[in-house]
Structures are given as structure tokens and as C-alpha cells.
Amino acid sequence: MSTTHTTVAAGADRYSLDVARIRGDFPILKQTMNGKPFVYLDNGATALKPEVVIDAEAGYYRELGANIHRGVYQFSETASALYDGTRTKVAGFIGAPDPRQVIFTKSATESVNLIAYGWALKNIVQGDEICVTEIEHHANFVPWQALAERTGATLRCIPLNPADGTLDLTGLDGLVNERTRLVAITAMSNVTGYMPPVAPVIARAKAVGALTVVDGAQWVSHSSVDVKTLDADFLVFSAHKMCGPTGVGVLYGREQLLEEMDPFLYGGDMVLRVRTDRTVFKEIPDKFEAGTPNIAGVIGFGSAIDYLLDIGMDAIHAHEQHLLSYAVEQMAAIDGVVCYGPTDLSTRGGILSFNVADAHPHDTGTILDQDGIAVRTGLHCAHPFMHALGVPGTTRASFYLYNTREEVDRLVQSVRRVREIFA
Amino acid sequence: MSTTHTTVAAGADRYSLDVARIRGDFPILKQTMNGKPFVYLDNGATALKPEVVIDAEAGYYRELGANIHRGVYQFSETASALYDGTRTKVAGFIGAPDPRQVIFTKSATESVNLIAYGWALKNIVQGDEICVTEIEHHANFVPWQALAERTGATLRCIPLNPADGTLDLTGLDGLVNERTRLVAITAMSNVTGYMPPVAPVIARAKAVGALTVVDGAQWVSHSSVDVKTLDADFLVFSAHKMCGPTGVGVLYGREQLLEEMDPFLYGGDMVLRVRTDRTVFKEIPDKFEAGTPNIAGVIGFGSAIDYLLDIGMDAIHAHEQHLLSYAVEQMAAIDGVVCYGPTDLSTRGGILSFNVADAHPHDTGTILDQDGIAVRTGLHCAHPFMHALGVPGTTRASFYLYNTREEVDRLVQSVRRVREIFA
Amino acid sequence: MSLEDDIYKEIILDNYRARKNRVRLTDADLQSEGANPSCGDDVELFVKLNGETIETVTYEGIGCSICCASANLLCESLRGRSLAEAHEIIQRYRGMLLEDEEPDFPDEISDLEAMQGVKHYPVRIKCALLAWNTVRDMLEQVSSA
Amino acid sequence: MSLEDDIYKEIILDNYRARKNRVRLTDADLQSEGANPSCGDDVELFVKLNGETIETVTYEGIGCSICCASANLLCESLRGRSLAEAHEIIQRYRGMLLEDEEPDFPDEISDLEAMQGVKHYPVRIKCALLAWNTVRDMLEQVSSA
Ligand SMILES: Cc1ncc(COP(=O)(O)O)c(C=O)c1O
Ligand SMILES: Cc1ncc(COP(=O)(O)O)c(C=O)c1O
């Protein structure tokens, strides 16, 4: 054991990132929680924000303040340019051919619902099928379940293989068949960090003429993404999980599809001409952005993207993989700890779900909290997944660019304490 | 002329607010625009933010950072308490009996759409009628128009009386009749500041068993509001128009109605139990708040409410009325300027729409911009209203607690320049 | 304030691990489920009545140590009590956790005082109340019926 | 840089006020509407062709001074031109406003250069382009047909 341990410890030199410098960018990392230096391992829930992002939001309020796409005055014009500039940045970040394919919503959750109301409600009828997977976050599960119920369509579910934590694709051709109109799949599980093979699922969906919705809420924040390679019809994600502000989500869509779709929210700024008897809607993306958007949030999101690009998504991914393998190895050395998810760590992002023998995840969470460590415990908005795993919940540690091996050590130490209390 | 002018100038002493102190709370008021001290008269579009609100948002990112309603650790718990604390503050602000009647959305626009999808889409059928008014903002018009089209219902419209700028209620009993299922009306026009008599409209709606939706986007930010007195089924408004952050809206609803309604957005945090074959939703307000909300925004909104309450909504309203009557009087003295809206200023909030002879509003806006004055020009997301007025747009100056008589003077001076250029 | 002194003391851990009351009653007069969706606690309670007396109470389900320990203590404390006594005990238990009241339980159920430390962990109070709120609602139905 | 020197000069205000070209053609070969929803500019253009030549162009609608002046100048500049010449003028006009190109119009339509000052008011550029983009799209249809 000690040999392995030494090898990995030496690996600290191999950080793909300048973590010390990065940590300086995040003011909250100077905090203590319950009297201990704050260790934030709940990145799967939301990421911390660097100073530049906080400043960009505050800067909008301090220096511009104006609403967008409406005023003829200078501050409004500048605010509009910054808002739309983020759209261009997001398009670049995910390799979208045209910024107009990027729709701002309030969350990944709203983005999925936009597809459900704007496309599916109109196009899916009784007898049709919708296919999801058992490892989805509720955000990419419940909207489809509700839609199936509303339309009389049938919901099918690609199952988990509980033995190895991967998706069981053996029945794919039956689950996605000529009745299937839409296939929804996550690109990275928020429970285990598992990145299922979306390519064969998308290929099969295309073969039967079904639309594809990819949940990138975890994936986009942790990997280099190219929507052209992905070749899905829709991709959804949230700014707050990628160092951006809360209250901003993204819907990326295929251009023609977005153009054909009905609007979702109706109101100001999405119409060209309104009379009491008829209304002409604007083109994309305006058609989908009714009302005053989260202007400060979108502007802050632009800074988050600059920040992440400056560091490099591949380097971030490598860093997380490094922490993940270190953590997996350390946890394996603790008697009574069970880790979930595929053992092939190359198929995973930096998320580690585990349980400590007799201790309920909630108890583990409380003990870690007392040690200053923030993790998520419970069902992770993925009830079907947990049900398939057959566990009452897990404790989840999830890593991001600012986390260190020392923080993993503190996690491990605290987990040992859980083990002792519940021995 | 000079007499009147003197009298009114002396009125500066009669400010109901300590405007000098208030101005110090808004960092943006120190800015210049186009080289001139910034005069912000576009409050109808969005309000400026005081330092305390900017700090509350930034403080969440700097000191808590965590997602809400999910973690067992301290920072998440504190963030949840702040988030839900704003709900209690909002309930208090509008006199709602129970905080659970306050649903956070992303905007007033989303709030209206929530009612349309969550209640109306299920309950309104062909042959039913929906009644709106001709003076609505698109946010409270287009969703109902779209819904009528989708369901086969008929859209009726309480007309403007173009002669005096009021609503013409003479035909009310016919427009709201036993086929009417829903009546949507604004409590304050964003074009003229006119506050139509909603009481008789709500009373008539109740008499025929129709639900009532009141658009408070302008009203709530500028007046003392009590939903018990209002007695409407729903009230919608936006944080950003009342010194709060962008990206936060409110839906207030009657408790029983909210409980009976279908959810709107589906996803995480709004479900009690999800299985592949059935799902149990949470109670209100959670049922309507799927996904990660705009946590920073809602927390900042809490500070905005504290800030406004501290100053007092009645004092703010009085201040705006003071500025409005001063502005109306000054503008009346400029040859060729036409002002819109009822002449009885007691029926109006602090909004003044006008046109300058031959100058198109867009030209007026540009000239004002060059003088450092921010106003809104154009159709104000109220095409049916503008159409009924028969104008190609207006220039709109809208006041808030930090505006001064000196700023009105600068507006008037600049409008004189417009007049000269387009003489 | 240490975890082991406050909430992870022997008495709580013992009640967490106890199996005796963790059983489905097939002949229950009352039966009801309670859940805390944020943490996944989910317990079902079974009550067998004999006139105005609670003959037995059991529970089943999944939950954290606080949730299960409090459920087990509930079963131990309410067994054999009259509805009125049960009501009184439930009130005191809630008062101890929610109103900071000094606990003052009959000697034979003074183990309930062990739950007092949960007060210092606001996130966990709802765990300590789940079974108790569920049973309160169940018994209220009988009283009002 | 003053407003009166840049955009509110005599030549623009005259073109704004001019009524001659502000008329509906009932026998138009081409007809199309363009709108800037953010400011309410909304113009309709009418083109009468004679083979490859633009016999006349007129417009109708509502718009600001920049929008209407540019529409009037458009009518004056394109009347009697071949489609190829029109294309060339439109290109130069757009280049002047969008690419900062030196304007270089034939003498008889050098009034177009008056629009150059709009460049300094980015919000207004779309006003100066509305009619021109609309007519460009209309003419492209004929060329490609
Ligand atoms: C009267 C009125 N209703 C509704 C809205 C829509 O508000 P929001 O854009 O915040 O959704 C506005 C704001 O423009 C308004 O003035
Ligand atoms: C995989 C996955 N999908 C969707 C979501 C929903 O994201 P949001 O809450 O930002 O809408 C989350 C975040 O919890 C997630 O982890």
C-alpha cells in the first residue's frame, strides 16, 4: 500500500494546472466552515465563482445598469453588446456554427422544458415513444415522463447495468425503434461522473428519425465539447456549474429545428409586430427569449467562459481525472467504503459517489461538514438511478479546477472518522 | 410662466425623500454618459441597483457559494435560509398571507407564462373567452393571444379611450361574460403610468367565475401593494424593476389555486419521489421551482426589498408624483410637445410618454443620449396600445426614488434642443 | 460541542442499530409514510390500537442514524400509552427540538433526552422529527374521527 | 463631433421631410416590407422595373429621420439605374457605414455621403440600413430569378 501511496503523492508535481494561482482567483476559498478551512467538493451541485465573474456582474450594475435591446442610449447599447457577446462566446465554447443557435434560459432544467413544450408537445402523440436512460438527472427525466403522460406516449428507459455502473446498451435497437420520436441522454452522470457512450445512441436515434437531447449540465463544465462532433439535435447546460452566475442556462439547438419550433415563453422582445388579431414572432434566438433576461448573469457568464478557456478545458479535465484516481485509490484503502461507478476511470469525470459501511450518507455529510468539507449527500435528483443501484443515497465528492490532493486527503481523513464513529 | 416656475422650484423642499442620501446608495449615479453626468430616466425598463443589493449578490458568491435545498453542510444551509428568507420578505411586501404563495420565476414574463401553461392550457377550451386590455405590455398580452390560438378560445380586449388615455369600461359586462374564463389586466401601464381601475374589472370577473391575472411589473415597484385588498387570483412582477437583480420574477397566487395547478417546469427539486413509472410532486412553492434557481439573484432581491421598505413605498410614490407633475408642467410649456396619458395625474405613477413635433422618438432619444439622459423610445412592448394611440412610438421618461427636479430640468432643456433641431 | 457528545453518542447509535421495532405490522390499524426528499429519509409507521391505547408501534424504511434512532425511540416510548399520553409525549419531544424547552420525560423514557443534541445541527432537526410528525398526523386522525 | 454636424444636418433633415418619394406604387413589380422592432421603424419599398432598369423606387411607412432620409436618398439614387449599377451603389453605401470605406459615389448622388456621420452613432446604423437592406434583398430576388 505504501508504495502506491508514495507514487501518487509524487504525482502532485504532475498537476496539469497551476492550482495555487487558480485558488487565488476564488475569494470563497479563503473562508472557513465550522472553524476549518473550507474544502469545497460539491462542484456537481454548483461551481464556485472566480473574482472576475463576480466583478463582471457587479460591474454591469455599477457602470451600465440598463436594460438591453431597447434603449437608444449608450449604456443600453453597451449592455446589449456584452449580453450578445456572451452568446458568441458560448457558441465558440461548444463549437456551434452560429451564435443564433445559443438560447439563454434560466437553467439546464428550463432548457429541457423548452424542448418539451416548444417541440415535443406539438409533435409527439399517443403511440409514440420517448427513450431516456435510467441514469438521468431528474431534469432530463421528469419532463419526458410528464410529457409522455400528457400526450399518451410511452416512456422507455435504457437500463443501468448495476454490476459495473455502465449503461446497458444491449437492448438499444428495441428501446429506440421506429416509434421513437425523441431520445434524451446525459453526457455525464451527476452521480458517478460516468460518461456513457452517447455516439451509438445518437446514431441509432438518427437511424430511426428520432430527435436527440443531450444533457450536458455536468459534461460541458468539465470537458472540451464540440457540438458538431456530438451531432445531437439539442444540448442543454447551466452557467452556474461552470464558474458562471446562478440563473443562466443554455439551450443549443440545430438551426433549422429551432426555426421550425414554436416559441416557448411569450411576451416582450420576442415579437416583431403585435396586433389584437395576430402576431409575428422574431427570428431565433430572440423568438425564445421573451422578457427581460438575466442580463447581469449572462454578462458574468461571458467572463466565466473567458476564464475557463484561458485555463483550458483539457487541462481541467486532466486535473479532475488526476484527483479522481487519487481519491479512488485512497478510498479503496478504507475498510467498509464502497465506491460506485465504472472502474475504468477514463470513462468518468471528476465525481466520486461512495458509502461508508453502516453510516447513512446524511450522517457522513454531517461529519464531513463538521470538518469543513462540503459534499452532497442523498439521492442527487436521480431517484431512478439510486433505485437501480439499490442504495438509500450516496455521499458524493465532486472535483473542479481549484481542488487539490490535500483536499482529497482531508476528505479521506474525515471518512475514516465516519468509519470510526459507525464502527 | 416665471411665477409658476418659482413656485414649483420652491417645491424642492417638499421632497418626501432624502434624495441626496439615496443617490449616494447607487454607485452608477456617479457615472457620466457621453461626457455628461448620467441622468437615468428609464426606470420603466429596469431600475438601478443600490450598493447593498450588489453586495448581497457578490456576498453570496464570496462567502457561501453553495447550491440550496440540497447540501447538509453549513454554507448550503445558510444559502437556503437566505433564499427562503426572501420569499418571506416578498410575502410581507405584498401582504400575502403565506410565503408559500410566492413562487420565484425568472421574470414577470415567465410568471404569466407559468399561469398560461400551468392553469390555462388545461382549463381553457374552444368557445371559452379570455379578456385582456388594449394597454397591456406584451408580457400580459401575447401569452393570452397565443393560448387563445392554441385552445380555440376567443380573445377579447377592453379598449383604450384614445381621447383621455383611460380604459373604456363601458362595455365591461359584455367583454367579461359567462364564457370568460380568465381576465388579464395591468395595474399600471408602462407607457403612460396610468393605473386603471382594476377593482371593478376584478369584481366583474369574480361575478362570472373567471380567474384574474394582474400585471404588477410597474405597479409593485412604485406603490404600496396589498394582495388581500387587490383580491386577484394572481399577481406577477419582476425584481429588476424594484432595485433588485435581473433574472428574478415573482408569481403570487391564491393558495388553493396554486395547489390545484399542474407544475410548469419539471425537473429536480420539485419532486418527492420519482420512479420510472410514476412521480409524486412536492407541495407549493417547490412544485413550481424546478432546477437550480437564481440563488444570488433571489438573495439580492431580499436586500432590495429591505432597502425599499426602509425608505417606504408611500414616500417613493409621492416622490414620483411630485416629479411627474413638475415634468408635465414643464413639458407643457414647450411648443410642439405632446404628452400622453390621463391628465388626472393622481391616477398615474411616475411615467411620462411624449412626442416632440416632427421628431421621431428615436431621434429624440439620440439627442437626449448625447446629453447624458437615458430614456426609452419606441413602442414599449405595447404595440396594441401604440396602435390605439395612433403614434409610431413615444419617448418615455420614467422616474424612481433617486431622480431629482434638476434631472427633470435637464430633460426639459434637452427636449428644447430636439425642438430646435427639428423646428 | 463535539459530534460524539451531541449526536453520535452510544444511545443514539444503539437505537439506530436496533432491529426490534423495525418491522412491518400486517394487522396495523394505522399506517402512514413520511419522507424528507432532500436527504432521502423515507419511513413508514404502523400503529396497532386497543381502544384508546396504543398496543404497539413499529416502523420500516430507510433513513439516517438520527431518523432511525428517533423512530426507534418513538416505538419504545409510545408502546402501551393512551392516546392522550402519546399526544403529550409527542408535544414534549417537539418542544425540546423546536422550542428549546427543557426535556422532562417520565423516567422510563428519559432516553429521549439523548436526542436533545440534534438541536445544534439545524439541518438534522427534520431527521429527528420525521417519524414523530408522521405519527402525530396519524393519531390526530383517530382523535378527530 | 456634434449632432448637428454629424446626423442632423440640413441635407438629412431635408430628405427626412421630403414627400415626393413617399408614396405607394400601385403598379410595382417588387414590393417588400422591412422593420426594426426595437425602434418601431417600419418601411415598405416599391420598385417598378423596365427590363434591367429600375424605372422608379418609392417608399412608405414610419421611421426616424435617419431611416426616412436614407430611404428618400435611396429612391433618388436608384431611380433610372440598371440593376448592376444599383447593386454597386448599395454595396458602396453599406461599405461606407459598415466597413468604414471612403464614400465614392457618382457626383449626381454625392448627397449619400451625408449619411456618413451616422457611423459615429452605432445604434442608428440599423436605421440608415433598413431601407437599403430591404431593397437589396428585393433586387437579389430578380437577379437570381
Ligand atoms: C407593465 C409591464 N408588464 C410586464 C413587463 C415584463 O417584465 P419582464 O421583462 O421583467 O418580464 C414589463 C417590463 O417591461 C412591464 O412594464
Ligand atoms: C446531469 C445534470 N443534469 C441537469 C441538471 C440540472 O441543472 P440545473 O439545476 O442548473 O437546471 C444537473 C444539476 O443538478 C445535473 O447534474
Image (spheres, coloured by chain):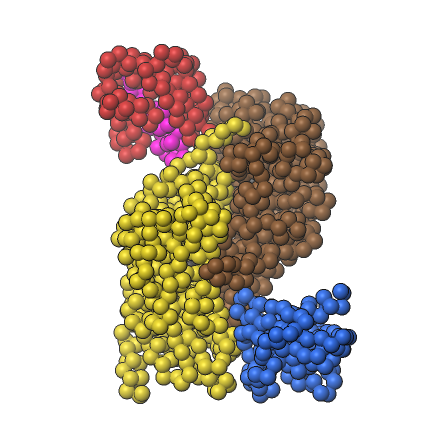
Chain colours: A brown, B yellow, C red, D blue
Residue at (43% x, 52% y) in the render: B154
Quarter-of-image position of residue D15: bottom right
Residue at (43% x, 25% y) in the render: C42
From the viewer's perspective, is C91 left or right of A175?
left
Q: Position of residue A342 (x, y in %)?
A: 66, 28
Q: Position of residue B203 (x, y in %)?
A: 28, 53
Q: Quadrant of the N terminus of chain B?
A: bottom left
Tell which residue pokes out farthest to the front in this image. Answer: D27
Residue at (39% x, 18% y) in the render: C59
Task: Find out whether residue B229 is within the magenta segment.
Answer: no
Closest to the observer, A279 or A53: A279
Q: Is residue B165 above or below residue B420?
A: above
Closest to the observer, C144 or D17: D17
Magenta region's main secondary structure?
helix
What count of labels does the image hold? 0
From the viewer's perspective, is B23 left or right of B367?
left
Bounds of the magenta span? Answer: C108-132
Ligand 1 sits in quadrant: bottom left
Task: Find out whether residue C118 is within the magenta segment.
Answer: yes
Can residue A90 be seen in this snapshot? no
From the viewer's perspective, is B139 left or right of D138?
left
Q: Position of residue A20 (x, y in %)?
A: 62, 47
Residue at (34% x, 54% y) in the render: B176
Closest to the observer, A36 or A171: A171
Closest to the observer, C42 or C111: C42
Quarter-of-image position of residue A237: top right
Q: Is residue B309 above or below residue D72?
A: above
Can residue A289 be seen in this snapshot? yes
Q: Position of residue A160 (x, y in %)?
A: 62, 27
Quarter-of-image position of residue A333: top right
